[in-house]
Image (spheres, grey):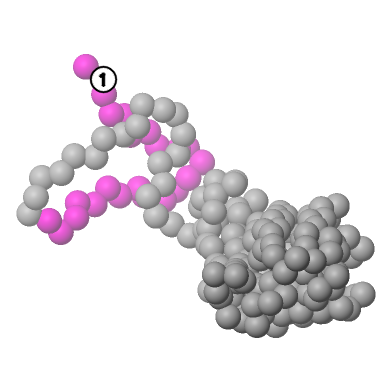
């Protein structure tokens, strides 16, 4: 028969109390057959490295077009955590965008995305190529026969913020459009589709 052994710590002076809940039902707590720490509740600081501590997401279906050669705020997405993150923790940023050509003849122009952190005045990503994580470019291919494609663009980056309450906005440098095709005029139809764009952020325990 295996046994449960409660062992004290010679370096500590506090008492460890096992308290019964206010219940009229018999219950059994079965310990896992592995070594380690069992954590059922606690503050974020108690969770191991790599744990997802909180998640926030913002999405948009509104249209945005730009011909700017520098990054501009799309005005579509602003996302922040409900609670301040703990110092030293990381933030995982994920972007999924619906893109298309902004006007007839723009063809396969590249689109660059970045998550702009307003609270630390910094682009989260490469300042030149733009997209979160850098070195990733997607082309939205258009055709002159009035059959315009909507393509999906993805980007992700794990970074360490310098503030505890980062607010991220979606910035773009491109001559392309979000959430529409050239003929959609913000009106989905059997001919012209419209899409959606979203940004998800996760606090990751360091």
Q: Residue at x 43, y 57 (%)?
A: 42
The residue most toward the left is 24
The chief SS type of the magenta part is loop
Give x and y (percent) for residue 62.
62, 80
- Left of 83 or right of it: where is 42? left
Q: Position of residue 160 (x, y in %)?
A: 74, 59
Residue at the (81%, 53%) spot, across then down = 136
On screen, 49 above or below 8? Answer: below
Nearest the eye: 137 or 146: 146
Nearer to us in this view, 167 or 152: 152
Q: Residues within 10 Å of mark 1 (few under 14, many from 20)?
A: few
| Point 54% across, 70% down: residue | 190
Q: Is residue 13 magenta?
A: yes
Residue 195 spot, x, y in % from top left: 60, 69
Q: Secondary structure at mark 1?
A: loop
**Residue situated furthest front in the rendering:** 145
Apparent side of residue 113 relative to residue 48 in the rendered image (left or right): right
Give the residues in magenta. Answer: 1-23
Q: Is residue 165 visible?
A: no
> Which residue is rendered at x = 84% and y = 61% of the image?
108
Q: Position of residue 91 (x, y in %)?
A: 66, 59
> Magenta stretch: residue 22 in it?
yes
The residue identified by callout 1 is 2
Is 86 left or right of 35, judged from the image as shown?
right
Quadrant showing the N terminus? top left
Instruction: Residue at the far top: name it.
Output: 1
């Amino acid at each position: 028969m295996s046994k449960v052994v409660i062992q004290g710590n010679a370096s500590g002076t506090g008492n460890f109390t096992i308290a019964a809940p206010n219940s009229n039902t018999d219950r059994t707590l079965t310990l896992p057959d592995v070594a380690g720490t069992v954590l059922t509740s606690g503050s974020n600081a108690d969770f191991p490295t790599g744990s997802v501590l909180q998640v926030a997401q913002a999405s948009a279906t509104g249209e945005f077009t730009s011909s700017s050669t520098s990054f501009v705020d799309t005005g579509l997405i602003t996302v922040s955590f409900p609670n301040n993150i703990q110092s030293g923790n990381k933030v995982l940023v994920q972007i999924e965008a619906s893109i298309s050509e902004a006007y007839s003849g723009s063809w396969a122009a590249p689109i660059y995305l970045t998550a702009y952190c307003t609270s630390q005045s910094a682009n989260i990503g490469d300042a030149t190529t733009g997209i979160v994580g850098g070195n990733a470019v997607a082309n939205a291919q258009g055709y002159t026969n009035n059959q315009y494609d909507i393509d999906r663009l993805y980007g992700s980056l794990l970074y360490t913020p310098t503030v505890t309450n980062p607010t991220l906005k979606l910035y773009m440098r491109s001559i392309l459009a979000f959430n529409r095709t050239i003929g959609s005029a913000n009106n989905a139809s059997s001919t012209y589709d419209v899409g959606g764009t979203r940004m998800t952020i996760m606090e990751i325990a360091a």
